[in-house]
Amino acid sequence: GFIEDKCLLKISSGLYTFQTYLKYIQETFISENQNVESLSYSAEHLARTIRQMVINPEEVIIPDAATQESLHTKLKSTNAWTKKITIHLILRDFTSFMEKTVRAVRYLKNTRSFSV
């Protein structure tokens, strides 16, 4: 069975998790800084919007500053080739996540009185 609240909770938590990765890409991929900044802002806005739709918004997992900083430090400590591969993998995973998000939101919109 499909549970709407659980789905929205996972989407919002996932978007908040990707913020650290998008920040890393923005700092690393300088030539596309403006595009990545726009993407990051849009993802954060979507995360906040969906979080407001969750029955208990406090259940949404938002990585704390220490976790984000630790991950960011690990990402920055790689060599040039690894950075390129890491960026590719992050963008691939983000694309996949967003494709699933679109499918879930479309399903919710078609089956319930859901409006985004």
Image (tube, helix red, strand yellow):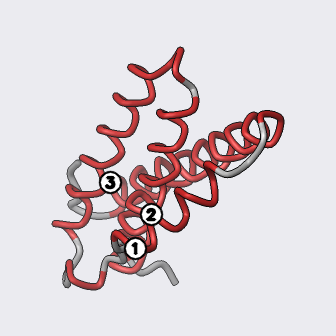
Q: Residue at x 21, y 61 (%)?
A: 113
Point out the tag, 2 or 3, that comes first from the N-terminus: 2
Residue at (21%, 83%) from the top-left corner? 58
What residue does disc 2 label?
69
Residue type at numbered disc 2: Glu
Q: Amino acid at mark 1?
A: Ala
Q: Residue at position x 67%, y 51% from top?
A: 77
Q: Position of residue 16 (x, y in %)?
A: 38, 61
Contact flag, marks 3 and 1 (Cβ < 8 Å): no
The correct choice, above or below, for 114 with respect to 70 in the image is: above
- Give the CA separation, mark 3 to mark 1: 36 Å
Circle 3 sits on which residue? 109
Residue behind mark 1 = 66
Q: Is residue 67 above or below residue 81?
A: below
- Give the residue displayed 44% in from the left and 22% down from the top: 33
Callouts 2 and 3 close, C-beta under 8 Å: no
Q: Position of residue 47 (x, y in %)?
A: 30, 56
Left or right: 45 in relation to 20:
left
Q: Residues within 10 Å of mark 3 (few under 14, many from 20)?
A: few
Q: Of residues 108 and 101, which is closer to you in this image?
A: 101
